Amino acid sequence: MEFSMLFITLLVLQAISPSQASIQAAPAKSDLFREYIGAEFKNVRFTDVPVNPNVEFHFILSFAIDYDTSTSPSPTNGKFNIFWDSDNLSPSQVSSIKNRHSNVKVALSLGGDSVGNAPAYFNPSSVDSWVSNAVSSLTRIIQQYNLDGIDIDYEHFKADPDTFTECIGQLITALKRNRVISFASIAPFDDDQVQSHYLALWRKYGHQIDYVNFQFYAYDQGTTVPQFLNYFNTQSSNYNGGKVLVSFISDGSGGLSPADGFFTACSKLKSQNQLHGIFVWSADDSKADGFRYEKQSQDLLAIPH
C-alpha cells in the first residue's frame, strides 16, 4: 500500500514538474547572432564574416522564392528556386563553414522584397497545393545544402492572412515533423498589411516559431534609443512569448544605427534579460566596412550575464 502511494505521488510530482520548471525559467539565453547573406551578389562568402566562438551563429541565405528563374519571373505556387549567390554560397561552402565552426548553423529565407525588378508576392493557388509543393521543393534544397532552418520573409501578399497562416504554419510544422529543419523564424516589420499576415500566423502557429527577426531597421532613419526601446516593447507585446531579436541594417538607411546608439539599446535590454539576440541585414553590405559591427554585436552577446 505504502509503495503504491509513493509511486502515485512520484507520478503526480512528475506531472507537475514541467509547469513548475517553466515558471522558474532560467534567464533568457541571449547569445544568438544571425546574418542574412547572398541577396545582393557582391561575392561575399561565409568565410569573410567573423565568427565569435562564444555565440550561437546563424547564416541566413537570401532568398529562396517560389518564382521561376526566367528573365521575367512569375509565381510557381510553392515550387521554390534558389535566388541567392549560389556560386559563392554553395553546398560545399555550407559544409565547410559548419565543419570549421561548431557553433554555426545555416538557414534559408523565403520570399524577400523583390524578384527580378518586381515585388515578390506570396501568391498561392490553394493551401493544399502550395504546402505540398513547398514541402517537397524546400526539403530538396535544404537537404542538398545541409541546412538547419528556415526564415519567412514574405513582404508582399496576394492572399489573405488566413491563407498565409495555414500555408506557412503547415509548412513549418511538416518540415519540423519530418526533421528537415530544427528551427524556424519570421521576419515581419511595422507595416499594416505585413503585420496583419504575420500576427495571424503567430496567433495560430507561434508555438512552432523559434525566433522573430523583427526588422527594426524598417523604422525611420534617425530612430533614437528611447524610440527603439519603445518599438521593442511594442513588438514584444505583439509577438507575446516570442524571442524578438533586435536588428540593424549595414548601410545605415533606417532604424537605430550602430553609430547612433544601437549597442547602448542592446546593453540596456541585456541588463534586463530581454536581449534574445541580434540580426543584421546584411553581410553583402557589411563586407565593405570589414564587418566591424558584426564583431561588436558578437562581442556584446558573448559577455556572460
Image: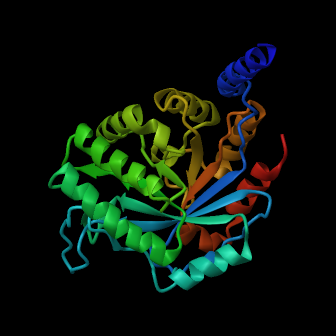
Q: Residue 117 at what x, y percent from top left?
A: 26, 69
Q: Quadrant of the C terminus?
A: top right
Q: Is residue 144 left or right of residue 304?
A: left
**Disc count in the image?**
0
Q: Residue 122 at what x, y percent from top left?
A: 25, 54
Q: Is residue 6 left or right of residue 198?
A: right
Q: Residue 291 at what x, y percent from top left?
A: 67, 67
Nearer to me, 261 or 183: 183
Picture residue at 54% right of the left edge, 68% below the top? 285
Q: Quadrant of the N terminus?
A: top right
Q: Residue 167 at what x, y percent from top left?
A: 29, 49
Residue at the extreme right: 304
State whether residue 63 is above or below residue 201: below
Residue at the extreme front: 1
State whether residue 79 is above or below residue 232: below
Nearer to me, 9 or 104: 9
Picture residue at 74% right of the left edge, 57% below the top? 55
Q: Is residue 65 left or right of residue 54?
A: left
Picture residue at 31% right of the left edge, 41% below the top? 165
